[in-house]
Image (spheres, helix red, strand yellow):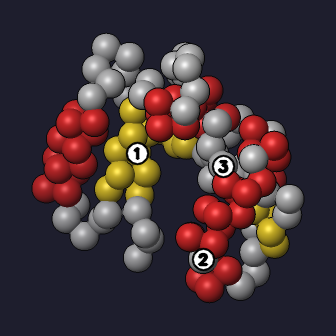
Amino acid sequence: MPEDVDVVYHDDSDISEQTEKLYDGKLAQMMPDVPWSCKNQARMHIKAGIDTPYKNTEEGLMNWTETATAVAARMDANGALHILAPFGLEDLFSMIVRPTPLFQTRLPQYRARLAQKRWEHRWSQLTFLE
């Protein structure tokens, strides 16, 4: 079971954490065995300590810690799948964990996140880079 399943979206008309929790609850009602974590990228700049809000979901992803996790997928009304991966998919498919450009200048935070996540215990094939 994953630690959590991130659901990312961008709604600058409502940046309340309460709304994210409401979405978590609705998803949990539909799929209670999944550990949902909804995050509005329109408010994540606050958590990151950045003054300027992200313009869209892609800009939010560009401020994530690792390139391989900065990936989102959505299905449109016609059932077509759309992938949003500002750093590409190569690291994800190659099982490489490396900091995004933002976190190349914040290596202590990157290292702390890796220590907290302990991914190497779950996936021994991962390669960690700085």
- Front residue of 119/29: it is 119
Question: SS for tag 3?
Answer: loop
For residue 65, the mark is 3
Estimate the x, y position of residue 37 in percent, counting from the top left.
35, 52
Q: Give the structural element (helix, strand or loop) at label 2.
A: loop
* Amino acid type shown at disc 1: Val
- At x 43%, y 69%, the residue is 3
The reply to whether residue 83 is visible in this rendering is: no
Q: Which residue is mark 2?
A: 118
* Alpha carbons under labels 2 and 1: distance apart: 21 Å
Q: Amino acid at mark 3?
A: Thr
Q: Are marks 2 and 3 in contact (CB under 8 Å)?
A: no
Alpha carbon separation for disc pair 2 and 3: 15 Å
Q: Which residue is mark 1?
A: 7
Horizontally, is 81 left or right of 126 in the view?
left
Instruction: Describe residue 85's horizontal placement relative to residue 41 as left or right.
Output: right
Marks 3 and 1, how far apart in space? 16 Å
Q: Is residue 62 left or right of residue 130?
A: left
Comes first in the chain, label 2 or label 3: 3
Q: Residues within 10 Å of mark 1 (few under 14, many from 20)?
A: some
Q: Is residue 2 above or below residue 87?
A: below
Tell me where residue 70 appears, x and y as whole percent.
63, 45
**Residue 29 location, x and y as percent?**
13, 56
Secondary structure at badge 1 equals strand
Q: Are marks 2 and 1 in contact (CB under 8 Å)?
A: no
Q: Tell me the crowding category of disc 3: few under 14, some 14 to 19, or many 20 or more residues within 10 angstroms, Cα based.
A: many
Which residue is most to the left?
A: 29
Name which quarter of the figure residue 5 lies in: bottom left
Q: Considering only vertical position in the picture, is 16 above or below 115?
A: above
Are circles 3 and 1 on residues that touch, CB within 8 Å? no
